[in-house]
Amino acid sequence: MGKNSDLLPIVLRDEWLRPAAAAIARRHGRYLDKLAAVERAAGSIVDYANGYRYFGWQWDAGLEGWWLREWLPGAADVYVFGDFNGWQRTEIRMHRDPAGVWSAFFPAAMYRDRLLHGSLYKLHVHGNNGWRDRIPAYARRVVQDEQTKDFAAQFWEPDAPFDWRGDAFEAPAAGSLLIYEAHVGMAQEREGVGTYREFTERILPVIKRGGYNAVQLMAIAEHPYYGSFGYHVSSFFAPSSRFGTPEELKELVRRAHELGLAVIMDLVHAHYVKNLNEGINELDGTDHLYSPPGEAGDQPYWDSKLFDYGKGEVQHFLLSNVKYWLDEFHFDGFRFDGVTSMLYRHHGYIDFDCRDRYFDEGVNEDAVDYLTLANRLVHDFRPAAVTIAEDVSGMPGMCIPIDDGGIGFDYRLGMAIPDYWIKQLKEVPDEEWNIWEMWSVMTNRLPGVKTVAYAESHDQALVGDKTLAFRLMDKEMYDRMDRASESLVIDRGMALHKMIRLMTIAAGGDAYLNFMGNEFGHPEWIDFPREGNGWSYAHARRQWSLSRNGFLRYSWLGDFDRAMIRLVKKYRVLADGYPYNLLMDERNKTMVFSHGRLLFVFNWHPTASIPDYELPVGAPGKYVPVLSTDERRFGGQERQSMQVEHFSFPVRGDDGQDHPRIRIYNTSRTATVYLRRR
């Protein structure tokens, strides 16, 4: 096992990892070797990740013309063609260098009036899979023909570069991140595809008013099938053209920064689309350009292709992609999708029932190396940038600093929390909810491993699943959400919707995430246009008007969410770490915990309202209610007055010491937050 002086800090801090010390040291050594190779090649990882400045279209000032370069080592012949040469496939031949990079030069004098901003083009590639018309991997814009539905790359060179002057935004510090997860295309209320411009003008102000300080954008990289939610990427360097132009996306980011909102990109490096017409699959005619050869290159559960993270050129491609979005579009970080699939050759479809699962032959160590390098790149290039791992496996070291032996993510998604809430609502009557189990799930995280807590995300809003609001109130949402209606189902649903969110944000982690519309209980699932629904956009939108309608209860839920966010920000709840458990009363389904001067009291019991309920507090003082899920302004009954002050009194404990306590009216299905005043 070695002396303590030989152990990495990650092992020194966690006794459970001592038996794996050698494996962790070897894994860290692999990363150091790869980083050293990168630095020998380019001086630094930041300078190494410049593929987007070499491949694709690049202006040569000395020769006065454009180079087009693409890495296609398995190709026998490659041509470039487009509207600038009348779509003649075999007129402009590209030339191969010893590394398998094909290039063609376009002198400005010859192509000035033909190769124009907006020109369409493709590659004509001869490989083992025959002659195929393909889109380059480094294409920065890809558009679809409305009539033929065919995709083509587009030469994109505006007259002037985007003006980023004055944009010096930095993402929120740890302990203050409040994320609003959003999808540009379905953020509008009309039936159709929303645009970057609409999102900038209409949705960013909504997010700002809600109190969130970050927006997490899904489906940014180009993807041929809209209904994939952006997770079957075809062109990794092209922002989706269905939402608008690259400049409009840049304007979205700049405007978000002006509003004080960080913009986090949902980055998909776990897999890519199988398509040959649009994607990078078999781009040079082989099945192993970006993937391992044969079946090893398939993601069988997602009907997609895997990356070969151990291949130097693939590593360079992906790291260049990471830097590209930070550099060219000023994103403030990434939520890395599908990290569990990346980390394991079994893609996480196994029980993680022992420590060995994290270090055995099932681990894809090339992917571990890549993710560590990616985090190093992000934080070297943009120190304030945020990285979030979507990992359900609990891989040790995920959010531990790289120099300490970890992989280097800033946060992990607390994926067990929404799974728990769904299980409770599906399987257990709320009068039987186990509050100790609830507490355990909410607080089950290692010290120093920052967690993004969320009650539900886009995953729970899709057809085939249900949002919390839909699970709680179901069909009654359609005709009982007006304020004049009386419904026990709606009353219960409204109360638990607020309590679940407050519990999650107060106890579940160090950051918080909400999917757009869920904060006000959006009534329906997400269903993208498809053959099965007649290609309808009716469910691929957000009905914001419901949250503004003063006759409906949705506005009450939205008002509560804003008040909850204000409270959390004002008293820095997320930065306070673990909540302090003061009381667990299983009989009355009541839990009490504190964050600093805030006291949280949750009564989950469906009927038991208890006058003069005595409970412990952390320090003597006057306790004043500052937020309650039962307030009338949030659709509650306000059974406990928000004006009542509760003065602590001493009670002699078994230890012979006096301990402060207060008495409250502990109303059923209510969460109340009290502020201690001296």
Image: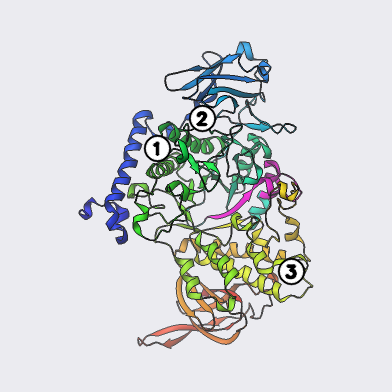
**Residue 542: x, y in percent?**
71, 53
Q: Residue furthest left?
A: 3
Image spot of residue 345 (x, y percent):
42, 47
Residue 476: give its label. 3
Circle 1 residues within 10 Å: few <14, some 14–19, many ≥20: some
Q: Residue at x 49, y 50 (%)?
A: 388
Q: Residue at x 53, y 13 (%)?
A: 63
List the residue tagged with mark 2.
52
Whole-angstrom CA distance, mark 3 to mark 1, is 53 Å
Task: Give the position of the N terminus as an image quadrant.
Answer: bottom left
Examine the image and state in which quarter residue 393 appears. Answer: bottom left
Q: Residue at x 66, y 81 (%)?
A: 639
Pointer 1: what residue? 310
Type of amino acid under label 1: Gly
Mark 3 belongs to which amino acid? Glu
- The first of marks 3 and 1 along the sequence is 1
Q: Earlier in the sequence, mark 1 or mark 2?
A: 2
- Residue 678 in view of the camera: no
Q: Is residue 434 above or below residue 523?
A: below
Secondary structure at badge 2 equals helix
598 vs 182: above or below = below
